[in-house]
Amino acid sequence: MMYVHPALIMIIGALLAPLTRGVVRKCVLVATPVIAFYIVTTMYSMTPGDYGVINYLGFELITSRIDKLALVFLHVFTLMAIIGAVYALHVEDSSQHTAGFLYVAGSLGTTLAGDYLTLFVFWELMAVASTFLVWARREKQSIAAGYRYLLMHTFGGLVLLAGIFLRYHEVGSMEFTAMLPEHAGVAEYLILLGFALNAAMVPLHAWLPDAYPEATVTGAVFMCAFTTKTAVYVLARGFAGFELLAIMGAVMTLYGVGYAVIENNARRILAYHIISQVGYMVCGIGIGTEMAVNGAVAHAYAHILYKALLFMGVGAVLEMAGTADLSKLGGLYKKMPVAMVFTIIGGIAISGFPLTSGFVSKSMVIAGAGNAHEIGLMLMLTLAAVGTFLSVGIKLPYFIWFGEDSGVEPKKKLPWNMVVAMGIAGFFCIFIGVVPGWLYKMLPFAVDYEPYSAYHLSETFQLLGFTALGFYVLRKKMVPKAKLNLDLDIFYRRALDGFMAFARNPISPVNEWVSELYRVVGYRIALGAAAIASRFDVSIIDGVVDGVAHKVRETGDYVRHAQTGKLQQYIAIAVSAFFLLVLLVANI
Amino acid sequence: MSALVNLISYLRSKPNLLMGLFTLMLGVFVLFDAFATRHGAHFAGDKVVGFWAIFGFGGTIIMTKFMKWFAHEVLIRPLDFYEKKEGEE
């Protein structure tokens, strides 16, 4: 049987999207992820092992390493790509479709990669393609947030690359295999740091709540699924059993819900909840037992679907009502009942109600912590579950659909394709909760866990019921405020401002036109990115990956001059940059 | 959908009924806990009837109070905080 890499299908779809129109394009948009999903289902009949091995300049590039861990992630990624594509079907802007599909291709390629070079190339494709989903909103704050997002991921990518080369220097192999905590040195921890940034691990998380709420309505649905969960996958493959991850994961669960309690923008609340939910997965991976890793993977599967459903429901509100700020919404249950039903399904699933996917996946991580005698971690994860129900299960629906009537009127009708996409995601949120065996049999290890025990049900009923009581008691305190809450992005925002003040003084007297360029915020950030990359190069990895940062600076400079405002051109540049990157990596 | 909307409107017009149902539900949950068999208890709390009820309620109150206080003391800025910085330059 001929084997086709599913990322290739997504890339072909990405290239076809801008070349087609009308019904043909809609067919391309649906067919592409459906074919990729079909390919993944056929992979289950293939013998686990390496496929698509290419010898290039003395390196063995393993484009497809197929095993149970990779397959379960590929399954949910391609399923999610179908949902995301259907949700975005009405969008005329082809650049969003192209960026979305390239982003998925990056995620699938990373998941299948058996060596670090292949992994790195697809890793960077994800970063670049997803940036366009932020920029495509074409608002001033989206452009700025997109640059900050790209800057952070460029930084993370360089750290990862430094780790990859150090490791190659030490072990003489590019193969991506599981690492043991007792043998981990600088190289392994640099790789871990690169992965941790994409997993939004505190304190490297600030890019996520900064960028995701600024993405387009449909772009955010893609973004909430792939970057962090691909990072979870590589952590599960490479770093299971690292105790640091167990602790950091538990911290993430609480950090995310803490911010969600005080945030006002619905999409920012959901963004903080990604950090919290990914924390469960990271913690499970860190604990490293078969049950905890199974739990992490099951939770990733469930999370992608209910989080997408939540972003779709809130995206529908943003699309129809023009805002996602809770302080401006309220009493919409009569006007948007469809979006309400689906968002509440997502809300109860993320909160772990019985008969929903969260119930059968989250509890596996928590029980995994308990069985490993990590009682402290177990209580932290349970407290985060309380916070999750409080902010996404109650606060978010309460202030959008119930509470005081805000008088907001929906400006347009909900497109049918959005309803279908929410329907698919909603179906799986319930289906996995009712038939957990369907998910459990896909997990990397054999499952010996029964979620529907009397005591687990009792624990869940009490936690959820009395959290609701807590909300009722404090409902006046819960009213969201239209304020900004500082997060750690202040440090790199300030650093960029500081750098700009430094850079401008010597430069502007020389070239008057430079200061003209600086007025647009994006230009400033591009220059900041180049400078930080350059400083990073000189001080940390000079000699190891000599020249890479210079290339980044040149590319940044090129991008700076290539501002035309046409996203199609941006994407063309991104694709060229991607291939340049391939060449660059292959030549070192 | 309209049946659902009507049901919500009806319940909203009867807050006492809603509270009564809610209180009854909480009571049933704790009662259920007294009879639930405890397989694989992980720690002492698992053996106390109603422990997770206290944990859920206490957790909500403490988390909310703490985050509201912390936000008020440290985190909160005007919405245009970053834009202002950019405008000043």
Image: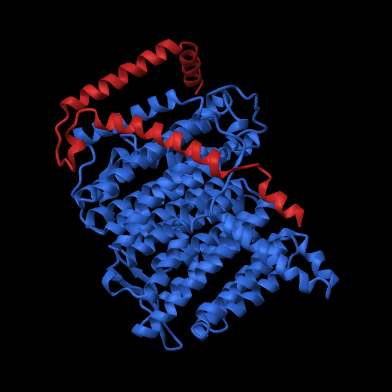
- In this view, the residue in front, B66 or A33, is B66
Residue A1 in sight in this render: no
Residue A210 visible somewhere in the drawing: yes
The residue positioned 67% from the left and 56% from the top of the image is: A143
x, y (%) of residue A289?
Answer: 23, 57
Colour chosen for chain B: red
- In depth, the one of A44 and A325 nearer the eye is A325
Residue A195: x percent and y percent?
43, 65
Report the front residue among A136 and A329. Answer: A329
Q: Residue A235's x, y, as percent? A: 36, 63
Residue at the image point whose x is 59% and y is 60% from the top: A492
Residue A402 position (above or below residue A225):
above
Q: Quadrant location of the N terminus of chain A?
A: bottom left
| Residue A185 figure quarter | bottom left
Q: In the rendered image of this protein, does residue A97 appear above or below residue A325? A: below
Letter of the blue chain = A
Seen at 57% across and 62% down, the residue is A129
